[in-house]
Amino acid sequence: MSTSILNEQDYYRIVYGGWMGKNIGGTLGAPVEGKKELLRLDYYPELPDGPLENDDLDLQLVWLHALEQYGAGLTSRELGQEWLEHVLFPYDEYGYALTNLRRGLLPPVTGSFNNPFNHCMGSPIRSEIWAMVAPGAPSIAAYYAYQDAIVDHAGGEGVYGEMFFAALESAIFFERNRDRLIEIGLRYIPADCRVAKAVNDVVRWHQEGVDWIEARELVLTHHGDDNFTDAPQNIAFTILGWLYGNDFEDAILKAVNCGYDTDCTAATLGAILGMLLGVEQLPDRWVSPVGDRVVVSPQIKGFPAPANLDELTRRTIRMGKKVLAAMDANIQVHADWPTVWRHDTEAGNRTAELFSRSVTANRYLLPTGSSCSADLELEIEFGQDGPAIGASQSKQLNLVFMNRSCIALTGTLTIEPPNGWDAPSPYPFRLQPGESVRWQPTIRANDFPAPTNEIFICWTRTHDRATWAVSKVPVSLVRAARWQVTGPNEHTERTAYFSGHRLDLEKACGIRRDGTYKARSRFYNPTERPVRLIAACNGPVVLHLNGQPVIDCDETVEWMPAYHRAPRKQTCELVLPAGTHEVEVKAVRNGEPLKLYVLTVSPKETSEPGPYYYYTDIVWE
């Protein structure tokens, strides 16, 4: 296979143009984010002195730092660590994933467990960095996008949206045709996912001669969602702007004027068109107001962010060279030779097997620290209830061990639980190369599990009947909350455990009918502090705290269980004394399946670490 050449000046031009377009689109769309009506913008709604801060770019600066820190072999684990160290955003899926990471959970479980926002736009907006460090290698770009997206969107459409854009943008380095680029992006996601269906529909409506305003209405009819950040509808609006736009300006304006997640749609399309055109062909009236500066949100901190787009571009290219070499992309960046694409740059799809992986399981390579050529692979499947266990509850773990070495392995498996917990006897095994064994041990918690509990899966390798080496895998289990629940017209309470913040009262009561559902529990607050209490429900809801009504929402409002933007009528803020507090909630089901989340988060104004973060040290009964 011949090596393709990417001229370094061409590389710089495409990357710089992409980052500039990202800043332009984000600055255009940010002031009108969340507006659901058809807009009529013809220029920046706020004329800034430099670009507006935007999480669309912020997070990619963190990922660039992750590449520089961990190298081309980074995975979702390292990206999750970057969230903990540098990202303090509370928004939607960001807030839920960060809560899971702070509890010691690992991707993809951080993105799938207890996360009502995994179909949203938080990951599709951060695709460009992976395309730019994998220029002309869509499969590699999509693979990195998957590792990124599963941290906070595992099992959701957000994963497919980021992979679609990353593959498409990577292909820009060797393909200029719009329709062909869309086809390439679709190749790296499941054909039956909602993102693919929305993109294919808007392409078809354009081919049929439907005008752009009618196409927007069709997107909302067939792919719309009340949550303005839902991914399929917004990705369709991005593609709509590209298909119907006559030039850069017309395209980004059509995308943003569709409304909804406007900073995301305009920023992504701006990046795509900036990569295609290069900065020299971007209109000066759009470039001049944003300039070359990089502006970083205050919730992103603790690493050396680029000062301007030139620095960002050069650091991106530096890491791109390392990624291409480490991934055997057969693409060489050269300072003097002209760009020549000599082989099928789409060969070797690295993403095909990713979609078969369980998003409720974690995988480990042993010995600890292995990244490839490991001796043993361990998979821990938590199931639909996730990594949670209640007081005095038993939980069965589903473990699979596979010998990935070239020799037989002999040893025992054991579980080291917290003090006072019950664990099974050691499990002896001998595995030939390529063989696997399934172990389904049951553990039992004591009466007072902590908010987060750490167990250890231990692999003791033996040689000549003597202990040779021991590997320990720490596994975090969060405490499931115990509630007493009743359904409509019921008077006898039953005990239910809820593994996350959602109270699935219909399932707990074993009924599916309209009426008032009740639940009561207690929680322990370790220190006096201000608390934002949320009862996010898709129907009327009343919440009593220590016998006093603190939330009384007598109408159906938009269901929004976000830490920072739950409906005002379903939130209250108060200074909560230290100690145990009783909670009773009444929620009304009226025609739709009941959705209820009870949350305890910080208020907006905090000293550290950021606004609206979840209090992980509050212990529910």
Image (tube, rainbow, N blue to C red):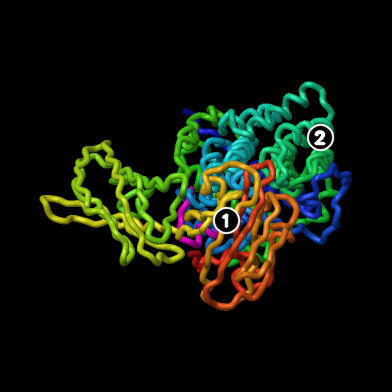
Label 2 SS: loop
In the image, which residues are magenta? 95-108
Q: How many numbered callouts? A: 2
Visible in this render: residue 561? Answer: no
- The numbered dot on residue 96 is 1
| In the rendered image, the vertical position of residue 350 relative to residue 8, given as above or below | above
Indicate which disc, 2 or 1, sits on the residue closer to the N terminus.
Answer: 1
**The stretch drawn in magenta includes residue 106:** yes
Residue 264 in percent (x, y) is at 71, 47
- The numbered dot on residue 245 is 2
Residue sitting at x 54%, y 31%: 345
Instruction: Left or right? Give the position of 361 relative to 346.
Output: left
Instruction: Left or right? Give the position of 162 relative to 100.
Output: right
Residue 385 in percent (x, y) is at 46, 48
Question: Which quadrant of the structure image shows residue 532?
Answer: bottom right
Question: Which quadrant of the structure image shows residue 159?
Answer: top right
Label 1 SS: helix
- Frontmost of labels 2 and 1 is 1
- The numbered dot on residue 557 is none
Quick one: 452 or 187, which is closer to the camera? Answer: 452
Residue 337 in percent (x, y) is at 59, 38
Crowdedness of circle 1 by 10 Å Cα count: few (<14), some, many (20+)?
many
